[in-house]
């Protein structure tokens, strides 16, 4: 099954961490130099340190001046927003289009992650039946049947499904056929090393991670969850599904901090659509 979904080569991530870090994930090395030039020409402070991230095909820049800090050291017409704009312009010039901006790590020190897609490499689409369900059965047969019932209908015309990042550890998927559930499962298995469990709850399929992928504090876990998102978007593309909407509907602020509300909240919601072929 993993051979059916090879590692992603057409989706990468540019993310912003702590007060000074820019992290490139799952991207070709050819992007490092133009991004470095954009930083040097746009930000009024120098690059403090660079680190290669071979485990995820990435690179990290640490900047002086804390561009993501509470009081970044900016100059005339030089702001953190302009820096992000310059980086995004480089990605576009090199053939990468922005498809998602999401804070997949909902903690105070973490900022948005920008996910880009390269359109110059197209693979043939898989039909929803092109899968080997005997290779991997991680849910009960009764749960799988709920999704297989919708496969034939999903082939007719335009189909969509939703993905919610829920609480600090759950991905909830509603309206997706069994093939897409398999594709998402394999993205998690490939990149999340702490394990997960899953099941159908109120008609939606839930993947609950061991650990807290959406409240990460270390670089390793934030890289892992970014790779899960990259691989998931890559896998479902094989069935013609692409992201068409992303909404941050999180509930944050004093209510969480002073009242210590423990109920899980939706921190991000996506809609993926499959057009007629």
Image: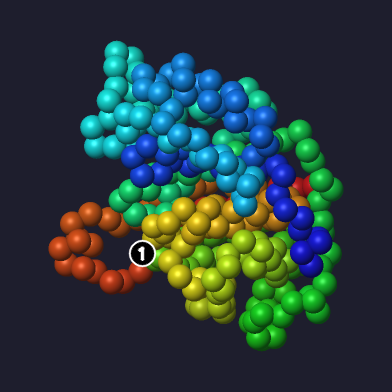
Vertical arrangement, residue 203 with respect to residue 110, above or below: below
Most extreme residue toward the top, as rendered? 76
Can residue 207 be seen at all in this image of the molecule? no
Mark 1: few, some, or many residues within 10 Å (few <14, many ≥20)?
some
Which structural element holds mark 1? loop
- Residue drawn at 82 percent across, 45 percent down: 123
Q: Nearer the viewer, residue 211 or 1?
A: 211
Quarter of the rendering containing residue 154 = bottom right
- Residue drawn at 50 percent across, 35 percent down: 50
Residue 237 image position (x, y, % from top left): 71, 50
Q: In this view, does 203 lie to the left or right of 107?
A: right
Determine which residue is flagged by label 1: 265
- Residue drawn at 32 percent across, 29 percent down: 65
Q: Is residue 1 left or right of residue 61?
A: right
Residue 160 image position (x, y, % from top left): 62, 56
Residue 271 image position (x, y, % from top left): 55, 52
Q: Is residue 80 left or right of residue 71?
A: right
Q: Which of 274 and 199 is in front in this view?
A: 199
């Amino acid at each position: 099954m993993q051979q059916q979904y090879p590692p992603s080569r057409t989706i990468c991530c540019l993310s912003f961490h702590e007060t000074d870090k820019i992290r490139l994930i799952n991207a070709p090395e050819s992007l490092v130099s133009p991004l470095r030039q954009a930083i040097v020409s746009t930000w009024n402070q120098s690059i403090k340190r660079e680190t290669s991230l071979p485990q995820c095909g990435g690179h990290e820049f640490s900047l002086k001046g804390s561009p993501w800090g509470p009081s970044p050291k900016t100059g005339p017409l030089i702001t953190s927003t302009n820096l992000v704009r310059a980086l995004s312009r480089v990605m576009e010039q090199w053939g990468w289009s922005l498809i998602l901006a999401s804070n997949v790590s909902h903690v105070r020190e973490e900022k948005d992650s920008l996910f880009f897609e390269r359109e110059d490499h197209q693979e043939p689409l898989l039909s929803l039946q092109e899968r080997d369900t005997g290779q991997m059965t991680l849910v009960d047969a009764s749960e799988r049947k709920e999704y297989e019932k919708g496969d034939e209908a999903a082939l007719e015309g335009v189909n969509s499904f939703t993905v919610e990042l829920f609480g600090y550890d759950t991905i909830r998927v509603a309206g997706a056929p069994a093939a897409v559930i398999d594709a998402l499962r394999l993205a998690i298995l490939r990149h999340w090393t702490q394990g997960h469990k899953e099941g159908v709850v109120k008609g939606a399929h839930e993947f609950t991670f061991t650990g807290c992928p959406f409240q990460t504090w270390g670089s390793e876990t934030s890289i892992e969850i970014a790779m899960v998102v990259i691989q998931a978007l890559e896998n479902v593309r094989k069935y013609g599904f692409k992201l068409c909407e992303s909404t941050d509907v999180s509930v944050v602020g004093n209510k969480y901090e002073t009242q210590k509300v423990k109920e899980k909240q939706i921190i991000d919601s996506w809609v993926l659509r499959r057009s007629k072929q």
